Image (cartoon, rainbow, N blue to C red):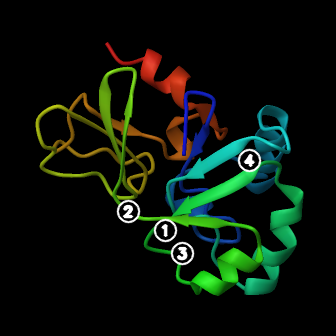
Amino acid sequence: MFDDQTWLISDTHFFHVNIGQYCSRPEGWQDLIIENWNYFIQPGDAVFHLGDLALGKKEDTEALMPLLNGKLHLLRGNHDRRSRAFYEALGITLVKDPYHMEYAGKQLVFTHRPMVPLPPGLINLHGHIHNNPTSALEERHINLSIEVRDYRPWWLGEILDSIH
């Protein structure tokens, strides 16, 4: 389903009023995310969102989706509580958590929350912790929360190339 040209992003939390303060996001953070999203992602690109897409009124999310380039695949986070029908009506494909795949000989597992303990041989791409790391995580945990990823999406291949 995904390859090294797939875009990854997590924890955008669109319309979550307090997240800006909780995570020390810059002024205008929602516009920054949308601008970066559309700068990097073309209309036909695959985007794998690792959860916590948007909160608030469903009308806000409905109005947001036409503004974002790409074909969105969502692995639900703890704040993605709308029905499957709601997401599918917006053209969003839901992905089961955890999602496993092999890429370039590496065993990857995508989750919203970090997988702890992490079984040997797996690399965990996750979100949820924003810019609040925990000592339970190790080098094989890759946090894709936007606060630690320049408020932009990243190519899967680019992220994996950064692993030593």
Q: Residue 97 has which mark?
A: 2
Label pair 3/1, CB-CB below 8 angstroms: yes
Q: Which residue is mark 1?
A: 76
Count neighbours of disc 3 (C-alpha within 10 A) and say few if under 14, some if 14 to 19, many if 20 or more.
Answer: some
Taking the image as drawn, is residue 150 in sight? no
CA gap between label 3 and label 1 equals 5 Å
Label 3 SS: loop
Count neighbours of disc 2 (C-alpha within 10 A) and say few if under 14, some if 14 to 19, many if 20 or more.
Answer: some
Q: Residue at x 57, y 61 (%)?
A: 74
Q: Residue at x 55, y 40 (%)?
A: 2
The amino acid at mark 2 is Asp
- Which residue appears farthest toward the front when viewing the image? 1
Which numbered disc flags the more N-terminal residue, 4 or 3?
4
Q: Which residue is mark 4?
A: 33
Residue 19 at x, y percent in the picture: 57, 64
Q: Residue 80 has which mark?
A: 3
Which of the two residues, 106 or 130, is positioned nearer the viewer here? 106
CA gap between label 2 and label 1 equals 7 Å
Above or below 121: residue 151: below
Which numbered disc flags the more N-terminal residue, 4 or 1?
4
Label pair 2/1, CB-CB below 8 angstroms: yes
Residue 10 at x, y percent in the picture: 54, 51
Mark 2 vs mark 1, foreground winner is 2
Image quadrant holding the C terminus, namely: top left
Above or below 146: residue 67: below
Mark 2 vs mark 4, foreground winner is 2
Above or below 17: residue 7: above
Q: Residue 160 has which mark?
A: none
Above or below 88: residue 4: above
CA gap between label 4 and label 1 equals 19 Å
The amino acid at mark 1 is Arg
Which numbered disc flags the more N-terminal residue, 2 or 1?
1
